[in-house]
Amino acid sequence: LLRILASRWPLLYQLGEMQKRLQGTEHSCDDVFHPSLNWVEFRAHACGFAEAVLPWLAGVSEGDAVPVEFNEGLSHAQGVVWKASSSAIAHGRQIADWTSDCPFGILTANIIRAAGIVIGDGDVYRIVQRGVETADGALRTMERLMRSPWPVFSLLNTMSHMKKSFHDTRLGPQDLLPLDAEPAEANRSLLWQHAAAGLRRAAGGQ
């Protein structure tokens, strides 16, 4: 899976599109009881994450602001991951046991949480590693995943685009104006300022 995530070949995109055509209600967890979690609600946030974040990464969304779906999906995913290891008791079972009744829901949550860490340049890459390893193991159940409504492949495709080629290397409109025009250098993006400083050093300036 790591090689697929790092590749430029659109395999995960194609799998995501194929899943949209094949998916049904199998393994949806719609009828799976959880004392403190609504699987239908979480899946809606996961689908929103998958649909909104990729256009934002590619710079084709309506604005540069972080999509609401990103923060909402990440917040809910972190809650699911926490519940997946909680030893608290409810209705005679541990919360972790209740949560484990929906393995594809847990898988989805782990992917979203790992994606949040990747795009945030977090220093807890062991969490990312565990998320990728979990997804890698789940790919052995490809047919079941394809027929489930959990957007696992679309989320993995989104995660594969979270490389240093988007927001951290994109100039803003103000950066493209002539040097003698507003805004002043101090008001241009940090990327522009770092690039300008590097060019000055290369030219022997200060």
Image (cartoon, rainbow, N blue to C red):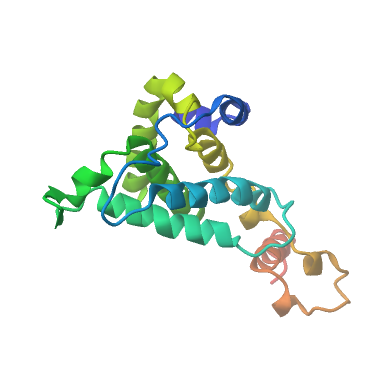
Q: In this view, does 123 lie above or below 106?
A: below
| Residue 121 appears in the rendering | no
Total numbered labels placed on residues in the image: 0
Q: Let me know if residue 132 appears in the view.
A: yes
The C terminus: image quadrant: bottom right
Choose between 3 and 33: the one closer to the eye. Answer: 33
From the viewer's perspective, is residue 201 above or below residue 121?
Answer: below
Name the spot of residue 128 as percent of width and height, x first: 38, 44
The residue under the point 75% across, 61% down is: 203
Q: Tell me if 48 is positioned left or right of 198 in this view.
A: left
Report the side of 59 relative to 25 (left or right): right
| Whole-percent x, y for residue 101 in the image | 27, 38
Q: Position of residue 75 (x, y in %)?
A: 42, 60
Residue at figure coordinates x 43%, y 29% from the top left: 26
Residue drawn at (39%, 46%), measured in percent from left and top? 109
Residue 181 screen position, x and y as percent = 88, 77
Q: Is 74 displayed left or right of 33 in the figure?
A: right
